[in-house]
Image: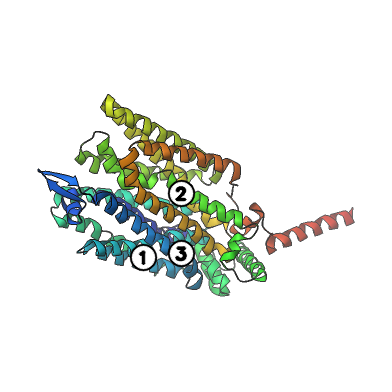
Amino acid sequence: MGNVYNFLMAFSAAMGGLLFGYEIGVIGQVLAMDSTFGVYYGLTSLVDGKYVATDANTSRTGDITSLFLVGCLVGALAVSWMADVIGRKKSILVGGVLFTAGAVLQTFSNGFGMLIAGRIIGGAGIGILSMVAPLYIAETAPAHLRGRMVTVQQLMITIGIFVASCINAIIIKTVDGDTKWRLALGMQMVPGVVLFFLTFIMPESPRWLANRDQDAEALRTLAKLRSVSQDDPAVIAEHREIKESIEMERQIGTANWSELLKPGILNRTVYGFLNQMFQQWTGINYNMYYAPKLIERMGFNKDDADIPFTIANNFINLIGTFPGMYLIERSGRRKLFLWGALGMGISQLLTCLFANLSTNHGKGFSWAAIFAVYGFVLNFAATWGPVVWVYQSEIFPLRVRSKGTGFATMSNWGNNAIIGKVGPIMTANIEFYTYLVFGIIALTAGVYVYFFIPETMGKSLEDMDVVFGATPTTHHAAQKELEEAEVEATKAKA
């Protein structure tokens, strides 16, 4: 019960993940609304009673997804500075406001330019939230629960995707005309408004407060998060450890972007970048953005692709997150990375095989391909989905934590934007062999993890310098001196 308040604050911060998840769930189905959204923005036209893709379809579809992600990249870059200057809590507030403003523009857009402006602004909000929410959770969580609490962010993303697909299914069946896609996009404003009000009850990160020399407030916040009094020895010791680490970092000097290239930190910078790159190139967002179109290509009708198959896909994505939340503090980060890479790689290769066979050998192989897709989603949701965010939020020292996590997050959005843009092109040119590409990359990610990624489970944020080979922080040096003194005292007595 002592960590109930801490979990509640983690869920509040992770509302940013729900916003992103809701957006993913919305845009995939909105893009499939040929008769309303597609015609309005010139993606499709009515020919002989059928809706046919226009010449601008591939380019504009790619722009709608990829430019949102470019906005995310810009937001992730901006928050690397913002989170240090105005704090983690206020950065979450800014991200929520930008996302909501973007949703308003998309809902009431009267042309493609206004739609894209809304996508970019909303994306900037998500870029901010995707970096600062896991960072906030990691800095407020106790070490033994940090992994599980940060995975709440991924859980909220999957909840957002699933809820959006269910609401959209109702909208698709009950609403006609342009109101259909405007209502679907407008519903994004609801979680944005909820996040806005939640920020007023969230405390600031105690580590950020301590770094600003607001020590009394940092100790008070830390005690509240741990549900104990300020006199509790464990809280006092945790606060002292944070302050010692900060003082040591101040002796090194003011942090700047070049710090990410220094020995002991450069390896963490590279791991953060590569983890996010591999996460995207396993094909998860390609699956989420274009799943309805792909299912149609496997021989299923459009209505089934838009609603039941999409809802099932998103439900599996949701329930798959729970094993990851359970195992991350038992099996550790490294094992989940390895299991996930193997499972995702095999699933994507099987999808490629069965989907290609389905074109000439009937629905049986189509169903096998669908279940292989679901197997991929399940593996991703339990492993690389949450673990990448946990890992990057905990590996950097405080003085460069916002910059390091911001850089890693930019890798996520940059690669995501590339996939969003080239996804329709890959589908048009190599069709189901797109899954072969993603499968090979997923297996390559497993090899990379095996040889390079160290385990971080159970380590405090102040312990990470030791894990990654940097100069030990003050409290480690002090501990070593104490141990050496005890050894000398024992020898003297002998």
Q: Residue 372's spot in the image, x, y percent?
A: 37, 34
Q: Would residue 227 be seen by someone viewing this image from the given angle?
A: no
Residue furthest left as drawn: 48
**Disc 1 from disc 2: Cα separation:** 21 Å
Q: Secondary structure at mark 1?
A: helix
| Between 344 and 115, the one nearer to me in the picture | 115
- Residue 380 in the image: state x and y as whole percent: 43, 43
Q: Are marks 3 and 1 in contact (CB under 8 Å)?
A: no
Q: Earlier in the sequence, mark 1 or mark 2?
A: 1
Is 69 positioned to the left or the right of 362 in the image? right
Colour scheme of this structure image? Answer: rainbow
Q: Circle 2 — which element?
A: helix
Kindly give the residue lying farthest to the front in the view shown.
55
Q: Which residue is mark 3?
A: 77
Q: Could you tell me residue 486's position as x and y percent?
A: 80, 57
Instruction: Residue under label 1, please give it.
Output: 96
Question: Which residue is rendered at x = 37% and y = 62% of the image?
Answer: 71
